[in-house]
Image (tube, rainbow, N blue to C red):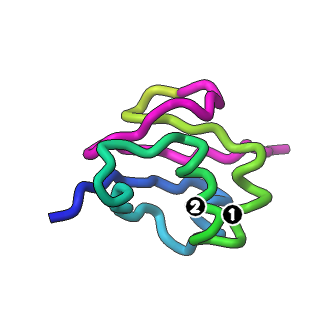
């Protein structure tokens, strides 16, 4: 059984991916993936996310995280991609 975590997409990120969430397996033989590597992976999986991720926030397990690329995502984590909100 593969170890995995969940990505939640909101607003324009959901529109770009056409899904509200997806399960992603951790890299083989690794207990975690860095936020930097996750961002690269998401850009490869969903080309339309590239411009959105440049300005998005991340939350891991319902806690906002700084855009510190050294943060580690582990099995069972829930990572939310939260694009900037615009209104008028």
Residue furthest toward the front?
29
Question: Which is nearer the eye, 47 or 9?
Answer: 47
Look at the magenta stretch and give its main secondary structure. loop
- Report the residue at 61% width, 51% height from top: 39
- Report the residue at 38% width, 57% height from top: 27
Q: Which residues lie in the magenta part?
A: 65-88
How many residues crowd around disc 2 within 10 Å: few (fewer than 14), some, or many (20 or more)? some
Q: Nearer the viewer, mark 2 or mark 1?
A: 2
Image coordinates for residue 12, horizontal then vertical, percent: 67, 60
Residue beneath label 1, please? 49
Question: Which is nearer the eye, 87 or 33?
Answer: 33
Cβ–Cβ under 8 Å for marks 2 and 1? yes
| Quarter location, residue 16 | bottom right
Q: Is residue 5 above or below residue 31?
A: below
**Nearer-N-terminus badge (2/1):** 2
Question: Which is nearer the eye, 28 or 9?
Answer: 28
Q: Is residue 77 above or below residue 1?
A: above
Image coordinates for residue 50, horizontal then vertical, percent: 74, 61
Residue beneath label 2, please? 42
Image coordinates for residue 73, horizontal then vertical, percent: 41, 40
């Amino acid at each position: 059984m593969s170890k995995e975590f969940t990505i939640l997409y909101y607003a324009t990120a959901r529109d770009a991916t056409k899904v509200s969430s997806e399960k992603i397996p951790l890299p083989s033989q690794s207990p975690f993936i860095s936020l930097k590597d996750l961002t690269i992976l998401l850009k490869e999986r969903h080309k339309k996310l590239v411009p959105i991720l440049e300005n998005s926030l991340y939350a891991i397990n319902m806690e906002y995280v700084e855009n510190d690329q050294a943060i580690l995502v582990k099995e069972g984590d829930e990572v939310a991609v939260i694009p900037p909100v615009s209104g008028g």
